[in-house]
Image (cartoon, rainbow, N blue to C red):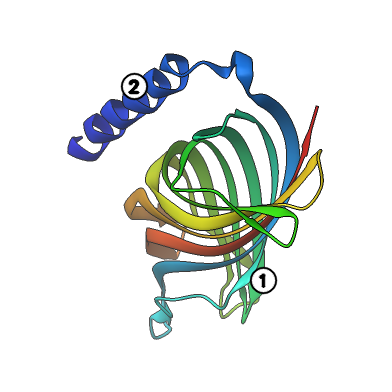
Amino acid sequence: MVKKIATGILAVALTGSLYAENYSVGQTFIGVELGSTELDSSARLYSDGYPAIEFGEKSDSNIEYGFRLGAQNDEWRTTVLYTYYNNEDSGYEDTMHKGSLNLDYFIWSTDAGGMKLKPFIGGHVGYMSYELNADTPENLSVILSDESGVFYGGQVGVALAVAEMVEIDLAYRYSFANLEDMVAEGIDWHAETSLDNTGSIVFGLNYFF
């Protein structure tokens, strides 16, 4: 409950900052991104007659795909972002869908070889769904977790305007999830799952119009 309240406050703050700025002198954009994402999660599967199966706390990095829509001016950038993540490894499969509002502040701007370089720092808040499937000792696929919840966090990176209408950026994004102590049960098995946080190295491309 405390996390949900904090997230709601952050969402109001971000939205207020968005509309407080004058975007009439800014630009709107659409974009895409690719991220190398790592999950900090844990799962334990109990099946009658078999030892408990425990999955590692950190997943291997895997690709996360994203689509962006936003607006920016010389100081601020606001982005509505959707991302999709899927990872199959060692008998289990993680899937995430995330939608978020991101607010970035450009710390400064400088010319670099005819291109504008802009370091930034920001925060985000959103809603996500998370599903974890695993294979049992009987070679059956079971859903260990299928939950939704809020997430929030921050990002830091640098944007580079490579052309009048094109900008690329490289950032690190860290998110805290609100999916803990998830329990799933079957006829002869039960599972306990938690997703604590995610970390991503993200490359993005924005086109202004």
Instruction: Tell me whether circle 1 and circle 2 mark residues in contact (CB < 8 Å).
Output: no
Residue 15's image quarter? top left
Query: What is the number of callouts on the image?
Result: 2
Q: Is mark 2 on a helix, strand or loop?
A: helix
Vertical arrangement, residue 65 with respect to residue 165, above or below: below
Q: Name the residue type under label 2.
A: Val
In depth, the one of 163 and 17 nearer the eye is 163
Corner quadrant of residue 24: top right
Which residue appears at 56% of the width and 74% of the height?
Answer: 136
Quarter of image, res 113: bottom right
Q: How many residues crowd mark 2 within 10 Å: few (<14), some (14–19), many (20+)?
A: few
Residue 22: give x, y in percent of width and height. 51, 15
The residue at the point 70 percent across, 26 percent down is 28
Q: Residue visible at 41% across and 80% down?
A: 54
Tag of residue 12: 2
- 31 sits left or right of 44 in the view: right
Front position in the image: 194 or 196: 196
What residue would you read off at disc 1? 88
Residue 20 percent location from the top left of the image: 41, 15
Q: Is the N terminus in the top left, top right, bottom left or bottom right quadrant?
A: top left
